Image (cartoon, rainbow, N blue to C red):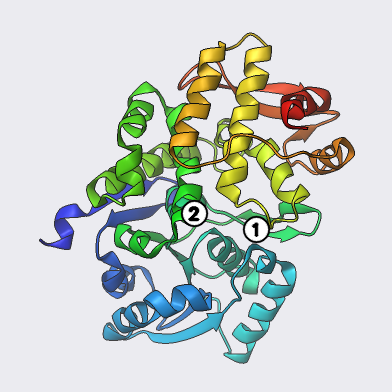
Amino acid sequence: MSNNLQEKKVKVNLDKRSYDIVIGSGLIDEIGLKIKPLISSKRVFIISNPTVFSLYGDRVCRSLKSVGFDVNFLEVSDGENYKSLETAYELYGQLINHNASRFDVIIALGGGVIGDLAGFVAATYMRGLPFIQLPTTLLAQVDSSVGGKVAVNHPKAKNLIGCFYQPRFVLIDIDVLKTLPERELKVGLAEVIKYGFLSGEEFLSFLEEHIEDILAINPEILTEVVLRCCEFKARIVEADEKDFGKRAILNYGHTIGHVIEASSGYKKYRHGEAIAIGMVCAAKIAQKRGLIQEGFVRQHEDILKRAGLPIMPPSLDAKDVMKHLLLDKKRCDEDHAFVLLKGIGEPIIESVAGDDILESLKPCQ
């Protein structure tokens, strides 16, 4: 079967910063042909980690070289703790040693850590050079590779140092998910479920029907899932590129999720696992405010459990929680701009006090 039969495209319309997201099977072998019309330079720098590069590096390099690109590989160690200013500084040094110009291209080959880090380096080296997202995890495919948020972590908070810098192109090959560890697939599914609760009954029902198909890496179902998530996020980004309004709804579950990640030193919980817990806590806050019924909280718990994700928060020290909440980018004075739901597909943003956030965590303390 031809790969092109499965190929889907989503356009992110941002005037001169517009770009395409192309989704399908076997596309990793077409990266050279896909980006050649978009790129004026002959040199590309692939930023990846050893694990991902060992799986896909040869195929990506072969495709790029086949259309005349001069290919260079910049290695980053595997792990969230390498998404840092120190790693960015090392990458700047390597680019300088290669005499990289502002017209050369960075390709982010990997998951969210690589995408965020490579995008940050692309945005800041020589005040910006083009970059391509080639995400290899479900989490990156449906979320972090789309929308132009690039960042590195500070020891005290995740994604605290960053900017908005749109990619030139996003290529999503569903086939790479076949080599994804089961835990990583589930981590990405948390963000997919988030889109289900945000977008409406139709997509959430589709997910509830096909959770097992997704976990079994059914290519047709996964293509549809990734397509719908990218379409939803693209429309949000078009309406609010710099996250001053509507885009904030994409942070559903993230305020508490980021606290859980930070409190555990980014070691115990993966991003999607923390977000899954954060969504349940957000649902509990909404229930306490009378926005939703208890059954809606149970619906959160049921689909997340079916996806193999945690729903119960760990025991957290109240002072530690408050310390991390103070670094929340959405905080306003003493309260937090918190994404809550009035129902499926009905997100609202309300001010939530730290005490209410602590209350949502209490059952597991």
Kindly identify the amino acid type of the residue bearing the numbered disc 2.
Answer: Arg
Nearest the camera: 164 or 59? 59
Give me the disc on residue 271. none
- Badge 2 is on which residue? 183
**Which badge, 2 or 1, comes first in the chain's sequence?**
1
- Badge 1 is on which residue? 151
Q: Is residue 46 above or below residue 285?
A: below
Snapshot quadrant of residue 253: top right
Q: Is residue 193 visible?
A: yes
Nearest the camera: 255 or 330? 255
Please state if 266 lies on the left or on the right of 109 as rendered.
right
Please state if 20 lies on the left or on the right of 356 as rendered.
left
Residue in the image at 86% along x and 35% along y: 318
Please state if 37 lies on the left or on the right of 116 as rendered.
left
Kindly identify the amino acid type of the residue bearing the numbered disc 1.
Answer: Ala
Looking at the image, which residue sits at the far right? Answer: 319
What is the CA distance from the residue labelled 2 to the residue labelled 1? Answer: 24 Å
Snapshot quadrant of residue 7: bottom left
Residue in the image at 62% along x and 64% along y: 120
Please state if 210 lies on the left or on the right of 240 as rendered.
left
Q: Is residue 46 above or below residue 262?
A: below
Give residue 273's position: percent from left, percent from top: 58, 45
Q: Is residue 104 visible?
A: no
Give residue 5's position: percent from left, percent from top: 14, 55
Residue in the image at 60% along x and 40% along y: 275
